[in-house]
Amino acid sequence: MSARELVLVDGDWLEERLGDPDLVICEVDERPLIYRVGHIPGARCLDWRVDLQDSLTRDLPDSESLARLWRRIGLTERSTVVFYGDQSNWHACFGYWLFRIYGVSDMRILDGGRQLWVREQRPLTREAVSENGRAALLPQASGERLRARWPDVQAAGERGVQLLDVRTTAEYRGDVLAEAGYADEGAQRAGHIPGALSVPWDVAVGEDGRLLAEDQLRARLTARGVDLTAPAITYCRIGERSAHTWFVLHELLGVEARNYDGSWVEWGSMIGMPIATGEDPRPSG
Amino acid sequence: MSSPARAQPPEDPQHALASIRSELDRIRAAVGRIERGLAELESGAASSARARPRQVRYLQVLVDVYDLGGRHGVSLEQWARIGSARGYDRRGLGGFFTGVRAPLRQADGRVALTVSGERLVDEYLAELP
């Protein structure tokens, strides 16, 4: 079985397994209310603002919070977790990355996410999913190596680690603080981290939101200047698009990659931190 | 030789009181006029804010675009299918792109939500049971 088959599934695979008691399906949307329009039968809604972060500390949830969440969704040692969501799986990939950090090994992303499932007219329901009462797996924060903090980013250049800015090119250049519609998610300054390459997250997806085949991924990323043999840190605005690119690099292509979830809202607002603007990855001035 | 300054006659208290009362009346009348004008403006603003609620199918079209289009919007072909499924003809679909607060925009052969459109989607979703 290829690395891709171990972590990425299509609609047929999932539809055949609906009702499997060992399958835990998690829908993670940018707009969690879209779950109410209809969701995959058995899927549980994880609200990324509530379930996947600690909003008081602006940090990942601690193991106690994760344990509560896992009890709620019935995640056990036998479980296979499938993540999917809107916006080409941005937040689904964040959920996947977070669960990986806390030690879950058997996980899949539904290729194309919610968008493709709906387009293929696969079953949707509005029925609530009850707790299954199973003894939950205990979270163990064993995947810190998958996460980058700002000192890691600061030291990236001297350690030979590539920085990949996966936001839009307009955000990278510093033309805008954030994309339209995300006015409350801007940093104090516009631009990018010095030395970072511009590799928008969507170079990895086709028009239908599905991830490209491995050879196409390699070609597109290489064309953007990414060295697929060297370690990398991905970042975006708040860490969800960069989780998508992290998934592509780490899980599909086997690159030693970490996600900097502090991302631009942290770096772009820190006092004393240099930034770069324009097309040039080097510092401004 | 300058003439000595003439002393001011002592102020008549009754006259001063009448003068103040008159001034107070003018101020009260002006406040009344301002309050009436303000009430008219507020009522006008409220009635435009209570504009005809958008039809559910109009909002469902936007939700369909969000749900099927992901980050990059839907193709023109998909857009036509969405409109048709929700009972819109070509002319009706054109209405989604007009006005400063148009909910949809078309670019590079794809139809995507504008910020106004995303706001309408959020409002619709918030009302769902």
Image (cartoon, rainbow, N blue to C red):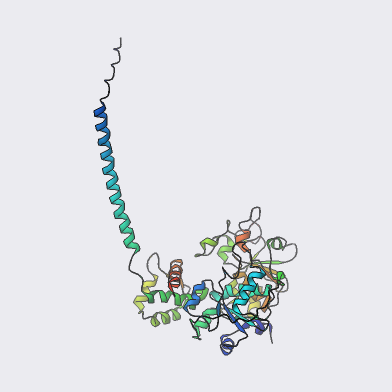
Q: Position of residue A43 (x, y in %)?
A: 55, 81
Residue at the right extreme, as displayed: A159
Q: Quadrant of the N terminus of chain A?
A: bottom right
Query: Dividing the picture into quarters, in which one does residue A54 lie?
Result: bottom right
Q: Position of residue A122 (x, y in %)?
A: 51, 86
Q: Residue at x 70, y 77 (%)?
A: A254
Nearest the viewer among A54 and B59 is A54
Q: Is residue A54 left or right of residue B17?
A: right
Q: Is residue A244 something that shows in the picture?
A: no
Nearest the viewer among B124 and A233 is B124
Nearest the viewer among B14 and A220 is B14
Q: Position of residue B31 (x, y in %)?
A: 29, 45
Q: Residue at x 49, y 83 (%)?
A: A125
Q: Is residue A2 something that shows in the picture?
A: yes
Q: Residue at x 53, y 71 (%)?
A: A30
Q: Vertically, is B116 above or below A81?
A: above
Q: Is residue B80 left or right of residue A73?
A: left
Q: Vertically, is A251 above or below A268?
A: below
